[in-house]
Image (spheres, rainbow, N blue to C red):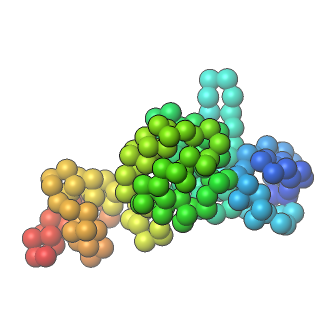
C-alpha cells in the first residue's frame, strides 16, 4: 500500500500529475483544489492507493484533511473514487464539513455526478462527519469510543473521558474511561 510520495513533478494536468520518486514515475489523480495548491517541482503527497480487479490507482492530496475526506467518502455505498474526487474538487474540507453538518442537499447537488437522491443518501450516511485535528485519531481510542457508545454513553461524555485517559490499549482505555465517566 502506497500512503505517500515525495518526489519531482514531471507533468501536471488539472486532474492528475506524474511524479518521479526514486526513478519510478507514478500517475497520481488529484482534485482541482490539490492541483491549485501544487506550485513547486518537489512535492510531498499523502496518497490513497486503490487496488481493483482490473486496475490500480493512486489519489494524491496536499492537505491531510482532504485525504481524510476522500477516504471517508469512498467507504460510502455508491460513492466511488471518481465521485469522491469530484467532491474534493468542488469543496475544501472545511466547507464540506459545514455542508454535512447543515445537511445542505442543494450544495452537494452542485457536484458533477450527484443528484438529489445521492446527495441525501451521502448526507445521511455521513451523519456527524468531522475532520478536525482534535478528533481522536489512534485506533485504540476509536475502538474504545465505539465500545463506550455501544454501551449507551454520549459522544461528549466519551470524548471528555478519553482525553483524560493515559492508557494506550483499547481494553484499558475502556476501563479507565468508564471510571472517569462515573465521576462526570
State the residue at coordinates (61%, 62%): 92
x and y percent of residue 16 in the render? 79, 47
Residue 72 makes an appearance in the image: no
Side of 80 where 58 appears, left or right? right
Q: Relative to 114, is 94 above or below?
A: below
State the residue at coordinates (72%, 50%): 30
x and y percent of residue 122 in the render? 46, 44
Rendering quarter of residue 42: bottom right
Rendering quarter of residue 32: bottom right
Side of 86 where 76 appears, left or right? left
Q: Quadrant of the C terminus?
A: bottom left
Side of 18 where 150 appears, left or right? left
| Residue at the left extreme of this rendering | 182
Residue 47 makes an appearance in the image: yes
Task: Please tell me how many numbered marks the rendered image carries.
Answer: 0
From the viewer's side, name the closer residue of 124 and 179: 124
State the residue at coordinates (9%, 70%): 182
Side of 57 where 71 appears, left or right? left
| Residue at the top extreme of this rendering | 54
Q: Quadrant of the N terminus?
A: top right
From the viewer's side, name the closer residue of 105 and 34: 105
x and y percent of residue 156 in the render? 25, 68
State the residue at coordinates (41%, 66%): 135
Amino acid at each position: 500500500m502506497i500512503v505517500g510520495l515525495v518526489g519531482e513533478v514531471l507533468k501536471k494536468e488539472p486532474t492528475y500529475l506524474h511524479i518521479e520518486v526514486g526513478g519510478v514515475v507514478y500517475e497520481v489523480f488529484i482534485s482541482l483544489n490539490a492541483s491549485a495548491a501544487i506550485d513547486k517541482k518537489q512535492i510531498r503527497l499523502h496518497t490513497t492507493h486503490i487496488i481493483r480487479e482490473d486496475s490500480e490507482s493512486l489519489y494524491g492530496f496536499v492537505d491531510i484533511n482532504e485525504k481524510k475526506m476522500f477516504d471517508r467518502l469512498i467507504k460510502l455505498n455508491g460513492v466511488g473514487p471518481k465521485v469522491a474526487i469530484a467532491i474534493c474538487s468542488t469543496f475544501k474540507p472545511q466547507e464540506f464539513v459545514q455542508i454535512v453538518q447543515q445537511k445542505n442537499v442543494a450544495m452537494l447537488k452542485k457536484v458533477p455526478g450527484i443528484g438529489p437522491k445521492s446527495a441525501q443518501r451521502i448526507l445521511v450516511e455521513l451523519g456527524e462527519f468531522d475532520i478536525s485535528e482534535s478528533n481522536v485519531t489512534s485506533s485504540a481510542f476509536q475502538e474504545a469510543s465505539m465500545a463506550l457508545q455501544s454501551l449507551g454513553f454520549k459522544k461528549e461524555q466519551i470524548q471528555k473521558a478519553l482525553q483524560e485517559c493515559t492508557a494506550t490499549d483499547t481494553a484499558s482505555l475502556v476501563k479507565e474511561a468508564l471510571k472517569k465517566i462515573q465521576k462526570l
